[in-house]
Amino acid sequence: MKKMIKTMKVSALVVLFVIISQVIYAQVQYKLDVKNSSMVIKGTSSIHDWEMKVEDMKSAFSLQSANIFQDKLIGGDFLINVESIKSEHSLMNKKTYEALKQEKFPQIKAKVIKAEQSQNAGKVQVELSIAGKTKLVNEDIYLKDLGNGKVEIKGSLDMKMSEYGIEPPVALMGSIKTGDAVKIEFNLVYNREVQLLGEASK
């Protein structure tokens, strides 16, 4: 009888150890690999189409485990420094920063509210803050496992500047006018990092 009780105690300790181990290492965070990622903003004007590249961005998201195709997303965020949005023309850059109210709102922020993923595709609802105005947007994304803990997320977002209280930039005394509609195309690569729950709160 004593031997049975001892065996049960050992078994209980093993089960407890397994549970604690899973809890401690449950959160897996993916951080953006900026060098291998890209984001381009495209639009039109009264003269020609234009595009601007985002050079400085930060992002991370967390899962319950390392399986991005099955596990529920815990949370995610994205941050862009407005001054890192650049074209080949300094005047256009200046007009863009003015339109985005860069001095008052130096960053564009996005926070994932919920996500649904299945195999290599998914849908995310994002709280997007631009020029002091926040809106909920929904977008489709495409996922690809690159191996070695790397994941690629692709997608695009169609939006209108006026939805965020932004007046489309104009130049040369109004002779060049920018269209209201823009498309944001992104190709993002994330690296996996296992994170202790204690570290997540720091």
Image (spheres, rainbow, N blue to C red):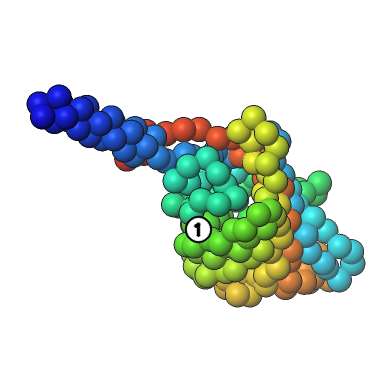
Can I make out residue 106 in this image? no
Considering depth in this image, is 155 or 148 the residue closer to the camera? 148
Please identify the quadrant where the C terminus is shown. top left
Q: Give percent across and percent down for residue 140.
A: 66, 63
The picture places residue 131, in percent across and down from the top left corner, at 54, 63
Q: Which of 53 and 201 is in front in this view?
A: 201
Which amino acid does the dot numbered 1 rest on?
A: Val
At x 55% / y 44%, what residue is drawn?
A: 67
Mark 1 = which residue? 112
Q: In which quarter of the image is the N terminus?
A: top left
Name the side, left or right, on which 195 lies relative to 70.
Answer: left
Residue 92, picture quadrant: bottom right
Task: Name the residue furthest front.
Answer: 1
Q: On the rendered structure, is 25 left or right of 133?
A: left
Q: Residue at x 72, y 73 (%)?
A: 180
Q: Which type of secondary structure does the marked residue at label 1 adopt?
A: strand
The image quarter containing residue 10 is top left
Horizontal side, residue 121 vs residue 126: left or right: right
Percent x, y for residue 39? Answer: 71, 49
